[in-house]
Amino acid sequence: MEDAAVQSEGRSGGIVINDGWPGYSLDLFSYPAHYSGDLDCVFIPHGVITDRTERLARNIMDDLGDHDIVVLCVLKGGYQFCVDLVDRIKALSRNSNRTIPMRVHFIRLKSYLNDQSTEDLHILGAEDLSFLAGKNVLIVEAIVGTGKTMETLLKHVEAFRPKMIKVAGLLVKRVPHNTACLPDYVGFEIPDRFVVGYALDYNEYFRDLDHICVISENGKMKYKIEKEGLQKEANVIQQKA
Ligand code: HPA
Ligand code: MG
């Protein structure tokens, strides 16, 4: 990636992808035919994601080796990153004297409609996290935007008094109102563009795409949900109940 500069320290902010990065032409990679016309470019190829994840696993192993951890996977967007990260940590545990015994737990957050964050953040599956008391927790998230979601989630998890909380985020977006809340392990720092693939969705589409791509205007139109439509749907469900 000619526009991507690898930070020399290799730790803090991850691989920086500059604002001018045009991505790769879709013709250079394979992707599902059902998304043809719906994408602008391949922003981060799948192989680069997995290679970077392997290094993050090593950093986590260096810091947390021999500690028991509870991995808290933030669904749905985080599932692929979590699976790959846990797999790499497992491989390192198999092949060295240091190991990380892991438990995996899932919670679900929802706040996006189309490509816009909505005010109401829902945390599902997080009702009783009391088993986190005294534990080392690794929160695994696909993407961190303003950091508001992460702040809310951290507060929620902290209330259960874990011994330690670390956060791994595959992507951190450079957005105007970024709070100071940054993950401890970052895969890539990216421009403020709406990306899909590698389990990241646009209205539930594109999770079945391996590369991280930029959605096209055509794709946004095709899979758009009208807010009124959603409201109507909610009303119908309420009436039926
Ligand atoms: N893509 C998908 N989901 C998201 C994004 C994004 O760029 N930002 C926050 N949630
Ligand atoms: Mg989403």
Image (tube, grey):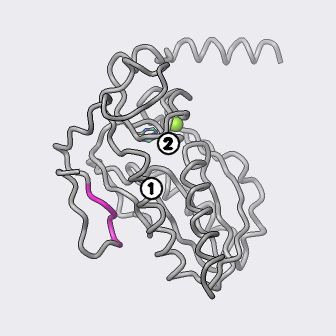
Q: Tell me where the magenta segment starts and ends, as one range.
A: 11-16
Q: Nearer the viewer, residue 180 or 185?
A: 185
Residue 57, placed above or below residue 4: below
Q: Residues within 10 Å of mark 1 (few under 14, many from 20)?
A: many
Q: Nearer the viewer, residue 44 or 234?
A: 44
Mark 1 CB in 8 Å range of ligand 1?
Answer: no
Query: At x 25% / y 68%, what residue is drawn?
Result: 7
Query: At x 60% / y 52%, what residue is drawn?
Result: 74
> As shown in the figure, which amino acid type bears the numbered disc 1?
Leu
Q: Earlier in the sequence, mark 1 or mark 2?
A: 1
| Residue with the mark numbered 2 | 198
**Separation of disc 1 and disc 2 at Cα?**
10 Å
Question: Quadrant of the rendered structure where residue 129 is?
Answer: bottom right
Taking the image as shown, residue 32 lies to the left or right of residue 23, namely right
Q: Position of residue 55 (x, y in %)?
A: 44, 68
Label of residue 234 in the image? none
Is disc 1 placed on a helix, strand or loop? Answer: strand
Q: Position of residue 236 (x, y in %)?
A: 72, 11
Question: Quadrant of the rendered structure where residue 52 is?
Answer: bottom left
| Residue with the mark numbered 1 | 170
Taking the image as shown, residue 155 lies to the left or right of residue 5, namely right
Residue 15 falls inside the magenta stretch: yes
Residue 29, placed above or below residue 16: above
Taking the image as shown, residue 32 lies to the left or right of residue 70, namely left
Q: Position of residue 23 (x, y in %)?
A: 26, 39
Q: Identify the image quadrant of the C terminus.
A: top right
Query: At x 40% / y 19%, what residue is drawn?
Result: 36
Residue 7, placed above or below residue 213: below
